[in-house]
Amino acid sequence: MPRSKAIKEGRKVFNNLYYFPENQMLDCNQYIIVDQNSDELALFDTGNGASLKGLFDGMKKINLDPNNITKVYLTHEHVDHVLGVYKIMEVMKENPPKIFAYGDTANILKGGNESKIFPGDWGIGPEMFGIEIEPLEIIDLIGLTEVQIFPGFTFQIHYTPGHSLGSISYYEPNHRILIPGDLVFTGGSFGRYDFPGGSLNKLIESIKFVNNLDVKYLLPGHMGISENGNQQIELSYRMVRSIRSFY
């Protein structure tokens, strides 16, 4: 079982928004939004399950109570982003949060489709993380153009495939926040497109789309975050287009 229980040292991005960086072993960055009118919390992506204790310890260190997580929003269906859902539902079974996902991601989790959560022939499975895959109750975001997380945080829902079939980006225009999952990263990086359901052409079109949004805070699934979102996305867009020139 991966030992990715190291504490996730959270930090404030700005009021009511917090960033928790990924641990090792197929984990991801996670983000917490605080409801300014209550103690409720919303979590974006759940990591690999083995890192959940590290997240909870990091939350407690900055006075965020994990028991107040009432909503979980997923960016796509891959192991490093969704496996923690099962651990969360286990440890919070007395008062479980609502889980939100889009289209293919929602269907994969509803059906407990392990082969879609672990893309390709990686030679690993949920048992390595101490997790059992089972069907879950998921609220499907498909058909929605936006969702109010909490007052002051209303995110647009944009379908941005290329890395996976279920990939979406959450965009908050008032605060200029983009949570793109594994679509685009800082430093000119971008998501892999060689997994089942991936597509270089779709990835390019999706990055082109988010490149036209007004983004200050780029909060991706891996690597660091940036307060120069548009600059970072433009760099990734140039880099990903250069790859297509080789085909």
Image: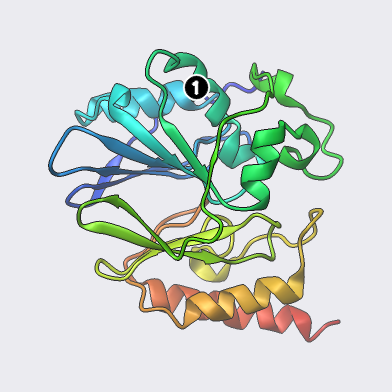
Q: Nearer the viewer, residue 102 or 229?
A: 102
Q: Say left or right for 149 vs 92.
A: left
Q: Nearer the viewer, residue 169 or 134?
A: 134
| Type of amino acid at the residue the image marks with label 1 | Met
Locate the N terminus by quadrant: top right
Residue 167 visible within the image: yes
Percent coordinates x, y for residue 194 in the rendering: 80, 59
Query: Which quadrant holds residue 242?
Result: bottom right
Percent coordinates x, y for residue 246 in the rendering: 83, 83
Query: Residue sitting at 55 percent across and 37 percent down?
Result: 138
Q: Residues within 10 Å of mark 1 (few under 14, many from 20)?
A: some
Would you name the residue on which mark 1 appears?
A: 89
Q: Is residue 170 above or below residue 68?
A: below
The colour scheme used to paint the residues is rainbow
Q: Say left or right for 36 vs 94.
A: left
Query: Residue sitting at 42 percent across and 25 percent down?
Result: 54
Locate the C terminus by quadrant: bottom right
Percent coordinates x, y for residue 45 in the rendering: 49, 42
Query: Which quadrant holds residue 63?
Result: top left
Query: Residue sitting at 64 percent across and 16 percent down?
Result: 130
